[in-house]
Image: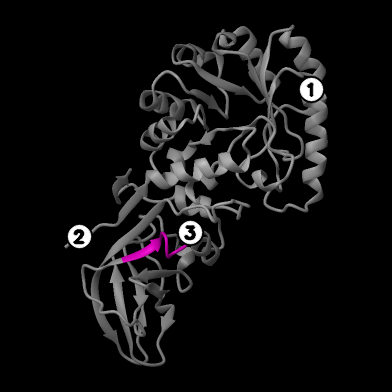
Amino acid sequence: MQTVSRLTIDLGAIVQNWQALHALAPNAEIGAVVKADAYGHGANRVGPALVNAGCKSFFTATLEEAVSLRAAVGDDPEIIILHGVTKETADEAKALRLRPIVNTLHQLRDWRFGGLVETGPAILHFDTGMNRLGLRPEDVPAVKQMLDDRPVGIVMSHLACADEPDHPLNIEQKALFDAIAAEWPAAICSLVNSAGMALPGYAYDLCRPGIALYGGGVDLPLNGGKLKSTLRFEAPILSVFMAKQGASTGYGASRRFGRHHRLATVAAGYADGLPRALSNSGFAYIGEDRCKIVGRVSMDLVTLDVTDLTCPIAPGMMAEFIGPRANVEQQALEAGTLGYELMTGLGARAERIWNE
C-alpha cells in the first residue's frame, strides 16, 4: 500500500494549454514562464516538452534556474532571467547564452560594462505602475545615454491588475508602456502575463504566460473551452474509523462532532504543500465524491469527513486535493490564497510521475 503523496504531471496538457494560448494571440510569440521549477511541475521536464511543441523563449526568475533549464532544453531556446544578473555572474550567463533582464540602472551598468552585451541586445524592463521592480519611466534619458546606441531587443513591463479587466490602471500602464516603447521602435514589445492575454490589444509581440500553462489563473476566452488541468496531487488513505458523537479530531480539538462521523486519515499535510489554512475548510475528492477537511492540517496528516460518501472507503485509496476534480483555484480560495501558491508549495517528498 502506498504511504506517500503522489504528484502526477500531464506534460501533454501543458503543451495543449500553450497551443491554446498561441491560438488566442496568433500574431504574438508565446513564451513560457518556468520559474519556481515550472510552478512545481518540474522545469527540466516541462521545458523539453514545450521546445518540442515549438516554444522558443523561456523565462526564469534566477540565474540558477536558467542554468538548470539550459541543461534540459539544449542550446537553441532563448532563456531570459527575470531578476537579471550581476557582473560577478556575467561569465556564466555569457557561457550559456542566458539573457538577463535589465531592471535597474545599476544592472544596466553591469550589462554595459560587465561583458553582458555579448549575451545579446538589451532587454529593458520598465515599471509602469506595479511599483515593484523595473526601471523607472523617468530613467529613459539615462538609459538611452548609457546604452550609447547599443541595440535593444525587448522592451517589457508588467501589469498590476490584469486579472481585473476593467481596472483603470490597465489603461494607464498600457499608455505609459506605449510611450516608453516608442523610444525603441525596433524592439520587441512584451506586456502581458497569463491574465493579460484576455485584454484585447495588449498582446504586442511577445506574451509571457505562466499560471495559464499549468491550468490555473483567470478564465481566458479560448476557442476550445477551458485550460486543461495539468497536475493531480493526491495522497493515500491510511485509516478509516468512526468518531463518536461529542468527539473531536486533530490538534487543538478544533472540530467537534454533534453526531457520529466516519473519518479518513490521509498521508498528507503542510509538509506536502497543504497549507494549515485549509484546516476545517479545504476539501478532497475520493472517486467522484467530494469530502471536507475536518480538524487541523498537521505536518504529515489530514482528516477527511467521509460520512456521506457513496463509494466504498478503505485504506490505500487515494484522495485528490488538486486535480481535474479538485480545482486548484477552488482549493486556493478555501485557503485564502491563489493557485500559484498551492502549486509552487507542493512538497518535495511526493512521488512524482510525468505523463507525456
Task: Please determine whether, in this image, residue 188 is positioned above or below residue 88.
Answer: below
Callout count: 3
Q: Is residue 187 above or below residue 237?
A: above
Q: Which mark is residue 264?
A: none
* Picture residue at 37% right of the left edge, 48% below the top: 10
Residue 220 horizontal/vertical position (percent): 61, 52
Q: Is residue 53 magenta?
A: no
Amino acid of disc 1 = Asp
Q: Which residues are magenta?
A: 319-328
Q: Disc number at residue 328?
A: 3
Quadrant location of the N terminus in the rendered image: bottom left
In which quadrant of the rendered image does the C terminus lie? top left
Q: Which residue is mark 1?
A: 139
Distance from disc 2 to disc 3, alpha carbons, whole Å, reads 23 Å
Residue 272's x, y, as percent?
A: 36, 55
In front of the other: 305 or 354? 354
**Earlier-in-chain disc, 2 versus 1:** 2
Q: CA distance from mark 2 to mark 1?
A: 57 Å
Secondary structure, mark 2, is: loop
> What amino acid is at disc 3?
Val
Reply above or below: 235 against 174. Answer: below
In percent of width and height, residue 171 lies at 81, 43
Nearer mark to the viewer, of 2 and 3: 3
